[in-house]
Each structure stands twice: as structure tokens, then as C-alpha cells.
Amino acid sequence: MKQRYVYVLATLLAVIGLSVFLYKWEVLGFPVSADQEKPVWTIESAVHFDSGPGSIKVQLHVPTLTPGFRMLNENSVSRGYGFSLNYGSGGREAQWAIRRADGRQTIYYRISVYEDDSVDVLDTTPPFPPLPVINEPLKTAADVLVSYVRDHSADTASFTTELLSRLNDPSPDPNVELLLSGVNSDAGFVDVARTMLAAARIPARTVRGFPLAGRQRNAPLVSWLEVHDGDQWLYFNPATGEQNLPERFLVWWRGNEPLVNVEGGSKVQVNFAVQENHLDAVAIAETQAAQRGTSAIDFSLYSLPIGTQAVYAVLLMIPIGALIMVIMRNMVGIDAFGTFMPVLIALAFRETKLFWGVILFTLLVTLGLTIRFMLDRLRLLLVPRLSAVLIVVVILMLFISLVSHRMGMETGLSVALFPMVIIAMTIERMSVVWEERGAADAMRAGLGSLFVAIAAYIFMGLAWLEHLIFTFPELLLVILALVILAGRYTGYRLTELRRFKELSAR
Amino acid sequence: MLSAARKLRENGVLGLNERNADFIMRLNPRRFYPRVDDKALTKELALKAGMAVPDLYGIIEHQGQVREFADMVGELKSFVIKPARGSGGDGILVVTGRSERRRDSFRLSSGMLISKGELEHHISNIVGGQYSLSGNRDKALIEYCVHFDPTFAEVSYQGVPDIRVVVYRGYPAMAMVRLPTRASDGKANLHQGAVGAGVDMGTGITLQGVLDDEIVDEHPDTGVLVAGLQIPQWAFILETSAKGLEVTGLGYLGVDMVIDRDRGPLILEMNARPGLNIQIANGTGLTDRIARIDEIYDASALPEERAAISRREFKLER
């Protein structure tokens, strides 16, 4: 009778857990594996300058509209500076200010973006530009060039292409040569092209940015030409006249204003460093969902503060450890100290990593046991003795940390992550078992604990499992169902097959 | 592996999970546990039911009382100190004599000498809860040391051999004799290295022995054959065990008895979670016997009747 309740309950839990899981997976599109990663680029712009005597104000253009990319997050690292983001004529501007600063200053602005083709440039349609005021003799040259290009083109796009091919002609005609005289940079070249387009009443802008590829310590800014054809903005390669954007081109800012403007500082220098990371699709999906205002993530763990998330990422693996514990104890039949001691040790292993974890644990327990046996001679009462063991464990941890730090092994420091009360209880239990049932039993249970801890660590450390549980916490219901079912497992334990071998022989 | 499990199943071997889930949890209500977990209470209940138990010299319930220990034992030459809530024989000290030369020095069953101070430390450990199941405070019992019957003298190494009877719903289902060895330090617990010998329920004659899950024919220390010994007063032992149900209310019970040279079978303790090695010692599984008891179960049967039925039902065919 009870058996049936157990099955019904377990099935119910599993069905609820799995259906929520399937809904989130199939309908909401949460990724089941952490492998579904997207490249995320973090671009760090470092503004270096020598501070002047007075107050300092730094303005830096930062990405506003980025076709093909969506912003994940942005932040600024600048000690002591007030920071704000404002909209200026060329788009967003980061602004730092400080009353006074000494010496060479460096301010960082960091933005993370990921590719998203659905990002359109919802830019405004610009007014027709005013005719540029050009002085003679350039005016004549410009007029000749514009009328020539207009004759050889049909629309804005072909006009721009033709104009750029004229400007890029390796053997330029005298007009072009005159217009380009004194131009010594990409940006200057684009400026000339823009002026010509303005002369033809075509709205155009300079676009500055860089193609994102791998890791770049010093990414050079690339100037590109943006032209409005009445409906939308078109991009042109100023060097070839082709209508395109380079692959993965991140637009940093538009317009003619300088990238950075430092008031009260000198020797300004701006560096861009690009780094490619891979972020799992969940984080991006969450940001996307949040930006789109859907409520799918309201009850997701990803909506928690990052610090809390990190805690839960670990906490949610404890049920996995408990499941391993159940399997090891009730199905395999391994002796271990304490019900959840191995799970807690496994948690500590997460920080120390397995090899050092096992070594530190063994060291701690061995030393603790030795001292516990010495304490035994003093014939202390139980609670004071347990407290003494606990204090000794804390001292040992401290000692191990200090010694390993001296020896330059920082891993030893992580010994502090071991749950000291649990270790103290383990030492006490082990010493009692040692006395009562002999070293063999104590060792067996000790090694059993370690073995279960290692098994729990391995499963609790599976990245895909961690991802799965964290993204789909409802799967905990399935684990609960499994544990409940295991609670009614009345079959033999694996070790019993050996234990009762005399009875299975016949 | 699966075939090994199937064979065990065919032979009716009871596993730990099945014992816990199907018998202990079903038949042993939690509230009755103190009756067997607290040996002082067990003793009291057994006495009330008219069963024979070793005399109690005194109970030490708190640290302040530890000093009274000397008065309790007086001039007694032998006695046993045990935790009321111990498990698996842990924390039991058997004092068999006193040193001739040094006063306040006691001789343990192992032959080792131990001072009064050390005994008192042991008692205060017991009271502090070192040996109790839950780690809570405990009581130390000081009681009569059984002078065991010569039947098992040649198959025991020091200590007291005892008889374990597994009683299912008041019917004795299986029994074994537990023989101390050098390895078990005189204790009659199989997991501490004692030898267990199965018993023919019909006659009370011992069968093969088991040591550390292996079948043995001889006692490892004395080399004497374990099988073929007749346990005295077998019928009485089974009847007393059967009464365990009435005394404790537990449907799955292990009753531990010793046979005193002078006073006959005495109840030492009872156990709500009797171990499963008894199956190896008897070379047969418990499941079949349990199934048979379920068939013939009669709620109105008296303990004596149940014991008689068990003797008839589980008599070995020769």
C-alpha cells in the first residue's frame, strides 16, 4: 500500500519536474547544454593622459548603435572619478570627472557585446546636409567631380561607389589630386568623401570602429563611410567603394567629433584591447529576454544578483551529492562516516581541486587523529575533548596554510575551505571506531568516506550537470523523486553480493 | 553480478535495504526503540515479564556519580561495565578479577590489568555519551558478570559467548551462537571478529561457523570444531526469546542471551536492528522463514506455543 504512494509521489514529482523542464527547453528555448556558447567580445578602451593641475573632465565616445551586435554589459574602471553616461550629438558619451589627480592617469571603459543579426539600425533619417562651404580653388574641383560622378551614377548608392572609386583612382585626375592634397589619414579621406557627398546633398557620416577578431592588444580604429539613401543608412568601404561593412564590425562612434576629449589633461592616448570570450547562451538569452521585457526569466535563478547566483550554483549541486550518497550507501553499500560528511568534503574539493583536496584532507585527518590519540591519554570528558579536537583542527588548518604559503604553494591556503566541524567530528568518530573495532575498520570507513566524497565531487563538478540544474532547477524534483524511489529500494547492496557469497554459491 | 543477486534472491537471503524498509520500519515502531536501546529499561521490562537477567549492581547516570563506582562494586571480584545505549558491544568492559598485589587494580577478561582511575575514565566516557547511538548523554550499567556455561568453553577465547535469536512477529526465526575470539577482544559481536555458528532451531545443535563473512569449521583460536554442540535448555531459550515481542512490542527483534553456569539462560539485551550475518552462519536466508511465519501467524498464540511452532517448522532435515 505504502509502496504505491511512493511510486505515485515519485512519478508526480518527476512528471512536474520534467514537464517544466521540457517547457523551458522546447518553448522558451533555454539551452540544455552549456556548450551552446556564443562568442562575446569585451572591448576595453583605456584612456591614458597626464593630469593637469586643476579639475579633470574626460569625455569618451562609446558605442550607441551597433548593427549586428547587442550589448551585454558595460562598465567603467576609474578610481576616484565620477562616472556618467550621456547622450551627445555623436551618440553616447562616457564622462569622467575628478577634482584633482596626480601623475599619469588611466581610465578604462569596458563593453561586452555579442553578435545578434536581429539588431537593426533604427536610426533617424537625417535632414539633407547644408551645402558645404568650400573655398576656391577647391570649390571648382569639387563641383567638377560631383557633376562627373552624378552623370555616371543612378542613385545614392551608385553615386557613392562611383565617387569613392574616383577618389581611389591610382592615377587620379587633377581635381581629385587637388581635393586630396593634405589628406594623410583614413579619417581625412573619409572627410573629403563626406564633403563631396554633402555637395551633392547626400547625408553621410564617418563611422569609426573595428572588426572584432580574436584577441587584440591594440586594435586600430577603422574609418568607414555611412551614407543615407533616403530609407536607410548604407555602409561603404572608403578604400574600395564597395558597399559593405567588414565582418563583425563594431561601430564605436559616428560623426566628426574626436573620440576623446580631456579637459585638464595632456598627452592623451587611447588604446583599444579586444578579447573574445565564450559565454553560454543562457546568459545571453536572459539578457535578451530582459531587454525584450518578457517575464520568462522572472523566476529564473539568472535574475538573482551575481553573488547569490554563485552561491546557488554550488548549493544546487548538493542534491546531486546527496543522490550520489544515497546510491553509494544503499545501492553500493560503502561504509562512510556521517551521513553528509562526504558531500561537504566534496564541496570543499571544488575549491581545492581533487588532487590537493585529497592530500589536504588526508593530511588533516591523519594529523588530527594523531593528536586525538594523544588527547586520549588525558582522559578528557566528551564535549571538552570534541572541542579540543575542533580547536586542534583549526590550528592544523592554519599551520598547513602557513607552511604551504612559506613553501610557495598557494593551494595549501585553500585548506581553510574544509568544513572544520565536520572534520573534527570525523576525526572523533574515526578514533572511536579505531579503538573499538580496530584500525582496519576505521581505515575502511575513512577510505569509504573519501571514495564517496571523490565520487560526489566528480558528479558535482560536471559542468553540463551544473548548467542543467542551474538553468532548470525544476530538475531537483526529479532528483527528489529518484531519492524517494531509492528510499524504497529493497534489493541487495552491491557489497552484499560479496558479503553473502557463501549463500549464493549453493 | 545480476546472476549473483538472482541466486541470493532464490536462496531467500535478506538484504540490509529490505530488512530496513520492509521489516524494521514496518514492524518496529519508533516509540518502542527506547525499550531495547536503553539496556536499563530493557532489564526492567524483562524482569517485570518474569525473564531472567544478570543482576544489576548499580547505574551511574551522571559524572558526579562516577566516584560512587568503587562503592557499587565493593569487594566484588567480577562485574561488567556497559553503556545503557551502546551499540554493537562497543564500550563494554568485562572485569574478571582483581590484582592480588596492587590494590584498586582490576583484571579485564583479556588478562590486561587496568587501574581504578582508568575504569572511572571509561565510565565517564560512557556517561558523556561516547558510545551511545546518538552521542547523547548516557548511563553506565554495572552488572553481574556471567560465568558462562562450559558448553562453549572450548570454542571461545575469553569473553562470554552468547546466543542470538532473531524473532519475527514473536516467532523465533533463526538463531546463532556467537563465540568470542582473540580478534574480537572477548566480545561476542561478529563485526568485531567473533565467530558466529548457526543453530538447528529444532534441536539446538550448532552448525557451521562464520568468521568475517567466510564459513569456518573450527574456532580460529582454539581449533575446536564449532559444529555439533548441544545448547542447553534450548526450548527455554526459544520461549524466552519469543516473549521478546510482548516485552518490547517490536516485530523484528534480535534477542541476545547468555547461559550462566549457575543461573541458566539470562537475557543480556535486545536489538531492534539485528544483523544479517546470522544467515551466513545458518547457511540459509531469512526470507523463506519469514514468509512461512506470515503464513502460520496467529495473533493469539502464546510465546511458548510460538516457540514450539518455530522448533517444529524450522527443524533441519537430516
Image (cartoon, rainbow, N blue to C red):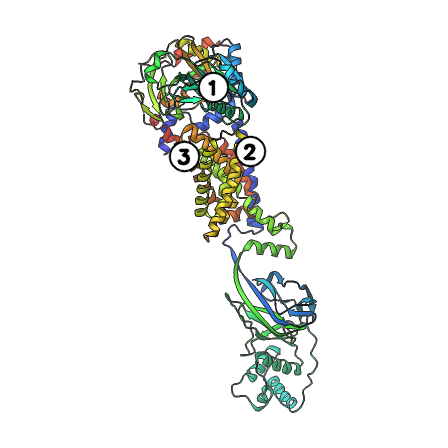
Mark 2 or 3 closer to N-term? 2
Q: Do discs 2 and 1 share a chain?
A: no
* Circles 1 and 3 on the same chain: no
Q: Quadrant of residue B217?
A: top left
Measured as percent of width and height from the top left, residue B86 is found at: 49, 23
Label 2 – label 1 distance at C-alpha:
48 Å
Side of A434 where A389 appears, left or right: right
Q: In the rendered view, tell whether residue A167 sits above or below residue B20.
A: below
Depth order, front residue of A454/A301? A454
Do residues under tags 2 and 3 come within 8 Å of each other at their CB atoms?
A: no
Q: Amino acid at mark 3?
A: Arg
Q: Is residue A220 above or below residue B272?
A: below
Mark 2: which secondary structure?
helix
Q: How many angstroms separate mark 2 from mark 3 (CA)?
A: 36 Å
Residue tagged 3? A444
Q: Is residue B118 visible?
A: yes
Q: Chain of mark 3?
A: A
| Relative horizontal placement of residue B233, taking residue A219 as reference (left or right) | left
Residue under disc 2 on the same chain as residue under disc 3? yes
* Tag 1: amino acid: Ile
Looking at the image, can residue B253 be seen? no
Q: Chain of mark 2?
A: A
Callout 1: few (<14), some (14-19), or many (20+) C-alpha neighbours within 10 Å?
many
Residue A207 sits in quarter: bottom right
Secondary structure, mark 1, is strand
Residue B81 badge: 1
In the rendered structure, find residue A9 and report the number of the disc placed on it: 2
Q: Which numbered disc, 2 or 1, marks the residue closer to the eye? A: 1
x 52%, y 88%: residue: A171
Position of the C terminus of chain A, as image quadrant, is top left
